[in-house]
Amino acid sequence: MATHQIRVFGDPVLKRPAAPVTEVDGALAKLVDAMFETMYEAPGVGLAAPQVGVQRRFFVYDIGDGEGPQVMLNPQVVAASGEWLYEEGCLSLPGLAFEMVRPKLVTVQAQDLDGNEVVIEGDELLGRVFLHEIDHLDGVLMLDRLDKAQRKQAMRELREQGMGVLTPGGRKHAL
Ligand code: NI
């Protein structure tokens, strides 16, 4: 199966809020499979639909905890607590990573591909993936959450690398 091109900073699709998933059909299942493959190839631990140009509220993830590839449709944060500092990266901001504090424990309610409601609690990295990917569904990039100094540095780095050229390395867990 062919992988998708990952949209990078500057692509307007990344700034637009996505619409709810209303139809769970074979086409969606196929797209999800292609997104798994795209995520693994990148490599990343999470990938949201807008990052492959699809303006629908879903994302895929696999944090390497043995659960395998997962998908969440129409995810919503229902609880968040604590604080956790993590150096966050993004497949749409190649080469960039910034330490950011976000909630440590995050509970998300979503639908799976069978139409079942699921509630999953994510601690640390898993919680971070949930928050990062749901931001993508709202048209929010990691960049938008940086403080002024970090943001300035990020913009400089993006400019220096010509924005949109994927560079190998420099990413730990890109989301
Ligand atoms: Ni991202």
Image (tube, rainbow, N blue to C red):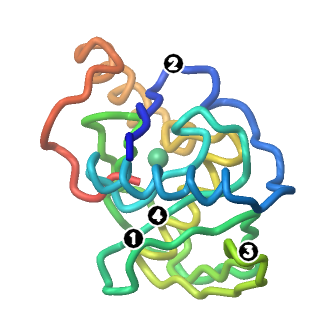
Relative depth, front residue between 141 and 151: 141
Q: Are marks 3 and 2 in contact (CB under 8 Å)?
A: no
Marks 1 and 2, how far apart in space? 26 Å
Determine the image quadrant of residue 63: bottom left
The disc labelled 2 sits on which kind of residue? Gly
Which residue is identified by label 1?
A: 62
Using a 10 Å C-alpha cutoff, classify the residue at mark 2 as few (fewer than 14 neighbours), some (14 to 19) or many (20 or more).
Answer: few
Relative to 16, say whether 48 is above or below.
below
Direction left: furthest residue: 169
- x, y percentage for residue 72? 64, 68
Relative to 155, say whether 104 is above or below.
below
- Quadrant placement of the C terminus: bottom left
Which residue is identified by label 3?
A: 110
Marks 4 and 3, how far apart in space? 24 Å
Using a 10 Å C-alpha cutoff, classify the residue at mark 4 as few (fewer than 14 neighbours), some (14 to 19) or many (20 or more).
Answer: some
Relative depth, front residue between 44 and 80: 44
Who comes first in sequence, dot 3 or dot 2? 2
Give the secondary structure at mark 3. Answer: strand
Q: Are marks 3 and 1 in contact (CB under 8 Å)?
A: no
Q: Are marks 1 and 2 in contact (CB under 8 Å)?
A: no
The disc labelled 1 sits on which kind of residue? Asp
Which residue is identified by label 2?
A: 10
Q: Is residue 95 left or right of residue 80?
A: left
- Name which residue lies at 68% across and 58% down: 26
The disc labelled 4 sits on which kind of residue? Val
Which residue is identified by label 4?
A: 101
- x, y percentage for residue 135? 63, 51
Using a 10 Å C-alpha cutoff, classify the residue at mark 3 as few (fewer than 14 neighbours), some (14 to 19) or many (20 or more).
Answer: some
Q: Which of the two marks, 2 or 4, is nearer to us in this view?
A: 2
The disc labelled 3 sits on which kind of residue? Ala
